Image: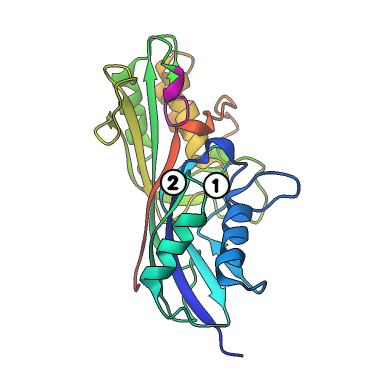
């Protein structure tokens, strides 16, 4: 039977989900999306593949997903309308297009961009919790900005990966690593100033972004030094960063770009 392949871009607020990947007895994004697709298509033979797993509570403004089915979708515009009408309100499909069978939503990605939103100095309004991590104490923002720059370029990131194995490639290149003021999201219940850590790369190790962010928070708290970060990026160095994984709710997969789609 002929198969048809579609690339769908999703947006979602991940705060109530246990990540993308389907898990038994847990509420996941993949589980909700698959259930919705089977309902609107009236077929059980529906397969989807996401661009990544994402941790529990991580959100996305552009999450690519590949749909594999055995019947052509004749009206893509109407499909998108039906899809969104039946998805829960914290998941939205923003586009769909047919792709070649050789396309792979995971392996063909060119650049992934994550943003991590945070504030510090006082407790935030509870409504901000899904996308904004709060640190009650003051942070040395200027020092954190200098620390963020250290991660840009080609480095050895084994210390910034949870459950590392002997088979992974820990030599990775970070294209962008910077802390700037948040100019993307705003709300009347946000504090006056909020910030975001922007990081771009071809791909990331498990929990790499949250471990880097956690290290930068430790730097801003005065618990580690700039030199400590420099040493942690050198292969075979035995000094490890403090094992702090930043909270997931501040992390958003902002964009994924592809070469030929």
Mark 2 and mark 1 residues within 8 Å of each other at the beta carbon: yes
Residue 129 visible, this angle: yes
Q: How many marks?
A: 2
The picture places residue 28, in percent across and down from the top left corner, at 62, 47
Please identify the quarter of the rendering in which residue 70 is found: bottom right
Q: Which residue is mark 2?
A: 60
N-terminal label among 2 and 1:
1
User: For the residue carrying disc 2, how many other residues have a C-alpha within 10 Å: few (<14), some (14-19), or many (20+)?
Assistant: many
Compared to residue 109, the image places residue 227 above or below, namely above
Tag 2 secondary structure: strand
Residue displayed at 47% across by 39% down: 209
Q: State the residue in front, 243 or 251.
A: 251
Compared to residue 31, the image places residue 44 above or below, namely below
Q: State the residue in front, 95 or 63.
A: 95
User: For the residue carrying disc 1, how many other residues have a C-alpha within 10 Å: few (<14), some (14-19), or many (20+)?
Assistant: many
**Membership of 23 in magenta stretch:** no
Looking at the image, residue 240 sits to the left or right of residue 224; the answer is right
Quarter occupied by the C terminus: bottom left
Residue displayed at 66% across by 74% down: 45
The magenta segment: 126-133
Residue 54: image tag: 1
Which residue, as the protein is rendered here, is positioned at the far bottom?
Answer: 1
Residue 133 visible, this angle: no
Compared to residue 36, the image places residue 164 above or below, namely above
The picture places residue 170, in percent across and down from the top left corner, at 54, 50
Residue displayed at 67% across by 49% down: 165
Please identify the quarter of the rendering in which residue 188 is found: top left
């Amino acid at each position: 039977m002929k198969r048809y392949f579609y690339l769908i871009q999703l947006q979602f607020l991940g705060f109530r989900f246990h990540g993308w990947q389907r898990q038994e007895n847990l509420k996941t994004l993949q589980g909700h999306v698959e259930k919705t697709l089977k309902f609107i298509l009236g077929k059980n033979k529906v397969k989807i593949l996401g661009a990544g797993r994402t941790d529990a509570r991580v959100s996305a403004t552009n999450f690519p997903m590949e749909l594999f089915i055995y019947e052509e979708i004749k009206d893509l515009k109407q499909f998108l309308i039906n899809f969104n009408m039946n998805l829960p309100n914290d998941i939205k499909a923003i586009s769909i297009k047919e792709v070649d069978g050789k396309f792979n939503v995971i392996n063909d990605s060119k650049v992934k961009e994550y943003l991590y939103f945070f504030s510090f100095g006082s407790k935030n309004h509870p409504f901000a919790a899904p996308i904004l991590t709060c640190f009650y104490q003051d942070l040395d923002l200027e020092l954190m900005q200098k620390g963020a720059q250290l991660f840009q370029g080609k480095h050895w990131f084994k210390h910034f990966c949870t459950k590392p194995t002997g088979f992974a490639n820990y030599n990775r290149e970070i294209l962008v690593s910077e802390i700037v003021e948040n100019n993307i999201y705003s709300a009347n219940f946000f504090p006056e100033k909020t910030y975001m850590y922007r990081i771009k790369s071809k791909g990331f190790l498990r929990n790499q972004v949250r471990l880097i962010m956690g290290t930068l928070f430790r730097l801003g708290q005065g618990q580690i030094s700039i030199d400590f970060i420099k040493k942690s990026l050198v292969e075979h160095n035995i000094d490890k960063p403090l094992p702090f994984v930043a909270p997931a709710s501040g992390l958003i997969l902002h964009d994924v770009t592809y070469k030929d789609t």
